[in-house]
């Protein structure tokens, strides 16, 4: 293996046969490659509350002689991906303490919108729009802050004649919302920062029932990715900081606009009927 992609592939291949502790390590490396690349074997072991020998065995399971070899591959890949936008981010994160919140949010959002244009193509957006148009039902899943994206999607896609099911529940209540989903249905899953049990359940259920799935996430690779027919990478900033939703909101808006444009006169007719109904009851 010569790069992070190869290590990522090996992690996915070996994941189901790993011990629980090794799976925890795998999740950490997949989701925090930059941090793992800067840690020693002892530091990673301490962070994960396990022995250094466990970290070494994990690296050897992936085909490396030891953790230093895996770490070096992580560093090499990160350096190869170090673009001008990342240098802008470094300047942003070293901004003076007196910078106000509005300037901070606009600067951070601008940076991540630039990254979005590099990570997500118009063709990818068009492919998701096509799935939305073909779907019998559209399940929009997002828990926590991303739940506001599902509310926006439900509001506009519903207005455009789509059959939308918004799902923000966790635990047992989640399954009340998804158990009837099946062939012909589409799940659009927003999952950021970590592998989410509920997101996994939605993706797995739709896949098992013959539906289609789209994953929108800031994780470049995870256990969720193989369950998705399509994945969009939407970066939102350092995990330890407040992370604006601007880039993810832009994706949701682009999907709504894509559906609106694809429906054309039908979309105009749908909104016209809404206006007529409001006018009838003097709510226009």
Image: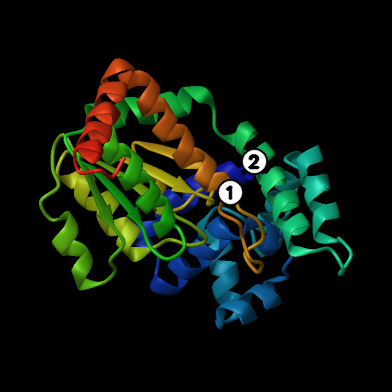
Residue drawn at the location 52% of the way across and 52% of the way down: 219
Question: What is the tally of numbered marks visible in this picture?
Answer: 2
What residue did someone put label 1 on? 246
The residue lying furthest to the top in this view is 265
- Report, in whole angstroms, how far the alpha carbon at label 1 lies from the one at label 2: 7 Å
State left or right for residue 51 relative to residue 263.
right
Sooner in the amino-acid sequence: mark 1 or mark 2: 2
Q: Are marks 1 and 2 in contact (CB under 8 Å)?
A: yes
Location of the N terminus (image quadrant): top right
Residue drawn at the location 36% of the way across and 52% of the way down: 151
Please determine whether, in this image, residue 139 is positioned above or below residue 41. Answer: above
Find residue 175 and name its label.
none
What residue did someone put label 2 on? 113
State left or right for residue 225 relative to residue 119.
left
Please determine whether, in this image, residue 121 is positioned above or below residue 243. Answer: above
Q: How is the image coloured?
A: rainbow
Q: Looking at this view, is 217 or 65 the one in front? A: 217
Q: Looking at this view, is 92 or 212 the one in front? A: 92
Question: What secondary structure is marked by label 2?
Answer: helix
Question: What secondary structure is marked by label 1?
Answer: helix
User: Can you give x and y, in whole percent of width and height, for residue 284 in the image?
Assistant: 31, 40
Q: Looking at this view, is 276 or 36 the one in front? A: 276
State left or right for residue 242 relative to residue 127.
right
State left or right for residue 79 relative to residue 7.
right
Please determine whether, in this image, residue 111 is positioned above or below residue 67. Answer: above
Residue 77 falls in image quadrant: top right
Asked whether residue 277 appears in the rendered view, the answer is yes
Residue 213 falls in image quadrant: top left
Tell me if mark 2 has few (under 14), some (14-19) or many (20+) residues whose alpha carbon lies within 10 angstroms of its own.
many
Q: Looking at this view, is 147 or 30 the one in front? A: 147
Residue drawn at the location 64% of the way across and 40% of the way down: 113
User: Can you give x and y, in whole percent of width and height, for residue 148 in the image?
Assistant: 42, 56
């Amino acid at each position: 293996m010569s790069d992070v992609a190869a290590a990522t592939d090996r992690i996915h291949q070996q994941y189901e046969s790993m011990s629980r502790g090794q799976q925890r390590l795998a999740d950490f490396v997949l989701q925090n490659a930059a941090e793992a690349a800067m840690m020693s074997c002892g530091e990673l072991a301490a962070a994960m509350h396990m022995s250094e020998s466990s970290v070494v065995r994990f690296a050897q399971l992936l085909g490396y002689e030891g953790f230093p070899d895996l770490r070096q591959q992580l560093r090499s890949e990160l350096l190869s991906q170090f673009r001008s936008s990342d240098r802008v981010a470094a300047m942003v994160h070293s901004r003076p303490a007196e910078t106000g919140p509005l300037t901070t949010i606009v600067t951070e959002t601008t940076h991540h919108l630039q990254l979005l244009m590099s990570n997500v193509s118009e063709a990818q957006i068009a492919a998701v729009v096509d799935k939305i148009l073909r779907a019998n039902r559209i399940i929009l899943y997002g828990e926590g802050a991303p739940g506001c994206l599902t509310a926006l999607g439900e509001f506009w896609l519903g207005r455009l004649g789509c059959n939308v099911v918004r799902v923000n529940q966790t635990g047992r209540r989640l399954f009340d919302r998804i158990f009837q989903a099946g062939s012909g249905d589409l799940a659009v899953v927003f999952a950021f920062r970590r592998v989410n049990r509920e997101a996994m359940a939605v993706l797995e259920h739709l896949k098992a029932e013959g539906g289609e799935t789209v994953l929108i996430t800031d994780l470049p690779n995870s256990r969720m990715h193989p369950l998705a027919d399509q994945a969009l990478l939407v970066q939102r900033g350092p995990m330890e900081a407040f992370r604006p939703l601007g880039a993810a909101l832009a994706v949701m808006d682009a999907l709504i606009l894509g559906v609106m444009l694809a429906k054309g006169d039908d979309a105009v007719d749908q909104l016209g009927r809404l206006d007529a109904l409001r006018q009838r009851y003097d709510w226009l």
